[in-house]
Image (cartoon, helix red, strand yellow):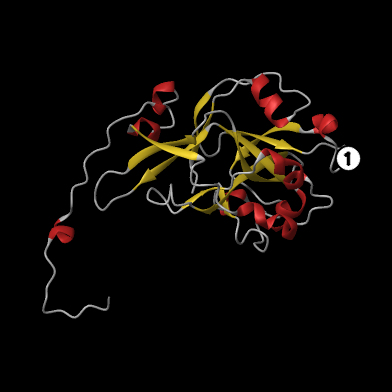
Amino acid sequence: MCGRFSLISSADALAAFFELAELERHEPRYNIAPTQPLLMVMAGHGPALAPASNRANRVPVFVRWGLLPSWVKDPKDFPLIINARSETAEAKASFKSPMRHRRTLIPASGFYEWQRQGRQKPQAYWVRPRDGGIVAFAGLMDTWSSADGSEIDTGAILTTGANEAISHIHHRMPVVIKPEDFSRWLDCKTQEPRHVRDLFEPVDNDFFEAIPVSDKVNKVANMEPDLQDRVEPAPLVESPSESKPPNDDQMSLF
């Protein structure tokens, strides 16, 4: 699951990392939420697998976070899809076409996740690359057209099973695309979905670090840098059912 993330890198850093033709401006965003504008990187109209010196045909686009398939008749009757399970996206009606024709990269500085433990208040974590910098999530994009001809570009983040380092917080995490795989992932002309399935494996255990942060991130209106400040997590308090000693008179299936 990925319901909030952050992108605080400069436009120059993003343009260099993704080898973009241009990116005029980008303000730091500390709390990106569903339905807000989402920056995506797409392959341009140049060669499908251009050499490194010619990859500037990659283009940045802004879409609404919450994928709306092109075949939907009334958006009011369709749920907001912010994530897509990579394991089944190739076969699902909502993602089948984007997986084949509109795979994207989503620039990020990291993401937020919440650890739920019994009846305690969920603990928020800021999950970022250990060495800082930029990370690329796998994304899907689609364009919905209304009856009056207006269009809206929308997108979702692909997720996979969490690695061992993150699984104690949540069982899902975004799919991370490494720079050496950018061209293959974005190449929807010669690389079919079955050719890129190997990219859905969870990132290495030492790639991310999880930092406990305050619950300020829970509110969309909070968008300041202190959202990512480390806090001391609340001590785990067992619920009555958890602390009650087992009944030895009952058989156990385990």
Measuring from the top left, give residue 129's x and y in whole percent.
51, 35
Label 1 is placed on what type of residue?
A: Pro
Q: Which of the 4 quarters of the picture holds residue 180? A: top right
Q: Is residue 64 visible?
A: yes
Placement of 20 over or under 64, stated as above or below: above
Q: Which of the 4 quarters of the picture holds residue 233? A: top left
Placement of 26 over or under 242, stated as above or below: above
Q: Is residue 143 visible?
A: no
Relative to the observer, which residue lies in front, 118 or 81? 118
Placement of 169 over or under 19, stated as above or below: below
Q: Residue furthest right?
A: 47
Q: Is residue 246 left or right of residue 122?
A: left
Measuring from the top left, give residue 16's x and y in whole percent.
70, 25
Relative to the observer, which residue lies in front, 40 or 164? 164
Q: Secondary structure at mark 1?
A: loop
Q: Is residue 199 left or right of residue 253?
A: right
Give the labeled residue for mark 1.
47
Relative to the observer, which residue lies in front, 97 or 78? 97
Q: Residue at x 73, y 60 (%)?
A: 194
Q: Which of the 4 quarters of the picture holds residue 182? A: top right
Measuring from the top left, give residue 27's x and y in whole percent.
58, 20
- Dot 1 crowding, Cα within 10 Å, few <14, some 14–19, many 20+: few
